[in-house]
Image: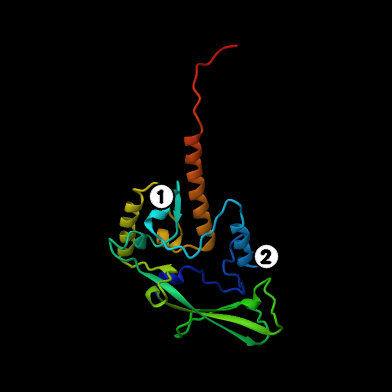
Amino acid sequence: MHTSVVKRLQVRMDEQDLYFPNDRYQFLPRGGYTILFRKILDHPNITLSLDTEFTRNLGREFGQVFNSMPIDEYFEFSLGELPYRSIKFHTRNEMGNIPAISVTNFTDDSPFTRETTWNALPGNPTKPANRLFITKEEPCDYKENGMERYYPVRAADNRHTALYLRYKELADRDQRMCFIGRCGTYQYLDMDQVINQSLQNVRSWLSIEMSIRTPVRSGKNRKL
């Protein structure tokens, strides 16, 4: 593991058990993330299409596309492949008491990095009683996990960053295509950062659209 990964979290000597203890706001959606996204997608202006095979022609019918797919895959790896890490999730259920801590991080030589007991999170009651649902995370190369990309891999010599920037130059030529998220911008981003990045991109696009559609009135000033 590269030392930069360890630097993501501050080493603390107190009994603080929060993931980001210095953040002002820390919360989980009431009812869980599934209900949150269902409510978002239930908006009358949102149409959800699943099981739709991607083609480059899909974006031509829209004025603006916010694309979260891997940027190198979009350009058919024409400049080379960007490396990614993935995660295999091993979930089991067993009988037991709900632990006081929901997440355990492993620092040993095992292939697993983290274990989450979902029943220990707020708003996740055990049904039936004493039935626990536990997931272990195993890092791997994305090619070993159905091409599911989770984290960009940054080399110490910045060659991967340089390759991404070459892809970004290609992307910038199409003003209707905006790449977002970890795979689109080849960055390690937390959830709040991804949401903020996406909102900022949408606000920027809306601002430009409004300036184009709003007529500019001109005329001579008159004294009354």
Q: Nearer the viewer, mark 2 or mark 1?
A: 1
Q: Earlier in the sequence, mark 2 or mark 1?
A: 2
Q: Foreground residue, 14 or 173?
A: 173
Marker count (numbered) = 2
Q: What colouring does the structure picture have?
A: rainbow
Left or right of 218? Residue 120 is right
Kindly identify which numbered label has been placed on residue 203: none
Q: Residue at x 42, y 63 (%)?
A: 53
CB atoms at circles 2 and 1 under 8 Å apart?
Answer: no
Q: Position of residue 52 (x, y in %)?
A: 46, 63
Q: Foreground residue, 73 or 23?
A: 73
Categorize mark 2 by other alpha carbons within 10 Å: few (<14), some (14-19), many (20+): few
Q: Residue at x 36, y 67 (%)?
A: 154
Q: Residue at x 65, y 82 (%)?
A: 99
List the residue tagged with mark 1. 60
In the image as oriented, which residue stretches furthest toward the bottom?
95
In the image as oriented, which residue stretches furthest toward the right?
129
Whether residue 68 is visible here, answered yes or no, is yes
List the residue tagged with mark 2. 30
Left or right of 186? Residue 89 is right
Q: Amino acid at mark 1?
A: Arg
Left or right of 54? Residue 135 is right
Q: Position of residue 19 (x, y in %)?
A: 57, 69
Whether residue 28 is visible here, answered yes or no, is no
Q: Is residue 134 above or below residue 17?
A: below
* Cα separation between marks 2 and 1: 38 Å
Kind of element beneath mark 1: helix
Q: Position of residue 145 (x, y in %)?
A: 42, 76
State which quarter of the image contains the C terminus: top right
